[in-house]
């Protein structure tokens, strides 16, 4: 549980860093760190397949997409960056307080009964591969459609204008 | 306190904090890429919530199946949204949300 707690603290600090970071690249690295800590937490909660997906797709692919998008834009000048940094401090100072308030509210209201038992223990685990192929096969179909739609959408968005 | 109650309680506190960070980020920023990052943080909070509740209820397989679907949708969303942001940047030379609200149509 201590390792989980450390990972959760790292996750929240990385999220805070993502929000407060001046540079978009730093914010993106913070997001990748949030994603990586969630992936490790998934491994620790017996969800290794979801962990692998989170690590490879969310930490890797999505970070690469963000990095590519940012690299295609012009960076701000130093004067603009300074102005925005001041404005950011004003804008984001209530965030840590709000996060603490959310934690207190969750601690107060989101509770299981004290004697609730972990249903995972002593239960025969269903293999996720069996579940995906035999029980949730329509999900797979939906995922294939979404991937194709994504590819098609990106092709349309990056299509060059026709020469006249 | 039982193990289930302790795990549920601990994780939910941090998930609530993550959710607030993402939500506040979306509300406060006017930069389109930062808005996307905020939505990503919200999705991360939901992902972790599904996994934790699956673990507590003994439905780890089902939770993983749902999370895999969620990740696929997330990638689709990010790829298409990044493409739209780039097109907006090409047209308006800015990624400020106020410029988007002034579009024709």
Image: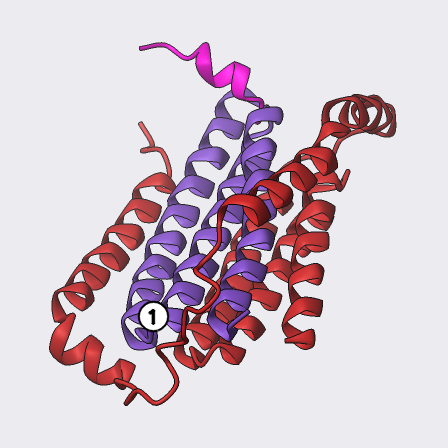
Q: Nearer the viewer, residue A48 or A155?
A: A48
The colour with which the image depicts chain A is red
Query: What residue is pinned by disc 1?
Result: B57
Q: In which quarter of the image is residue B104?
A: top left
Left or right: residue B31 versus residue B47 is right
Residue drawn 49% across the image and 23% down it:
B91
Q: In this view, does B59 lie above or below B103?
A: below
Q: In this view, does B105 lie above or below B64?
A: above
Specify whether residue A97 is in view.
yes
Chosen colour scheme: by chain
Which quadrant does the N terminus of chain A fall into? bottom right
Q: What stretch is highlighted in magenta?
A: B95-105
Residue drawn 37% across the image and 81% down it:
A120
Give the class, few, some or many, for how many residues have Cα within 10 Å of label 1's Cα (few <14, many ≥20): some
Residue B9 position within the rendered picture, expressed as x and y whole percent measured from the top left? 54, 59
Left or right: residue B105 versus residue A79 is left
Callout 1: SS: helix
């Amino acid at each position: 549980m201590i390792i989980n707690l450390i990972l959760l603290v790292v996750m929240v600090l990385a999220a805070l860093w993502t929000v407060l970071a001046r540079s978009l690249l730093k914010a993106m690295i913070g997001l990748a760190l949030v994603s990586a800590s969630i992936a490790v937490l998934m491994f620790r909660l017996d969800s290794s397949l979801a962990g692998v997906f989170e690590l490879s797709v969310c930490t890797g692919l999505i970070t690469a997409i963000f990095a590519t998008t940012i690299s295609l834009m012009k960076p701000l000048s130093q004067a603009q960056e300074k102005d925005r940094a001041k404005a950011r401090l004003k804008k984001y100072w209530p965030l840590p307080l709000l996060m603490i308030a959310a934690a207190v509210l969750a601690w107060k209201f989101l509770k299981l009964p004290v004697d609730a038992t972990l249903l995972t223990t002593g239960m025969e685990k269903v293999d996720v591969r069996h579940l995906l192929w035999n029980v949730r096969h329509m999900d797979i179909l939906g995922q294939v459609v979404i991937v194709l739609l994504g590819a098609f959408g990106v092709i349309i968005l990056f299509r060059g204008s026709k020469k006249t | 306190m039982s193990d289930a109650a302790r795990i549920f309680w601990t994780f939910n506190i941090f998930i609530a904090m993550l959710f607030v960070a993402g939500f506040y980020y979306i509300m406060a920023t006017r930069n389109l890429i930062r808005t996307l990052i905020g939505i990503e943080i919200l999705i991360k909070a939901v992902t972790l919530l599904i996994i934790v509740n699956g673990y507590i209820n003994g439905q780890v397989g089902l939770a993983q199946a749902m999370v895999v679907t969620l990740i696929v949708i997330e990638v689709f969303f990010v790829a298409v949204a990044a493409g739209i942001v780039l097109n907006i940047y090409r047209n308006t030379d800015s990624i400020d949300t106020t410029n988007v609200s002034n579009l024709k149509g």
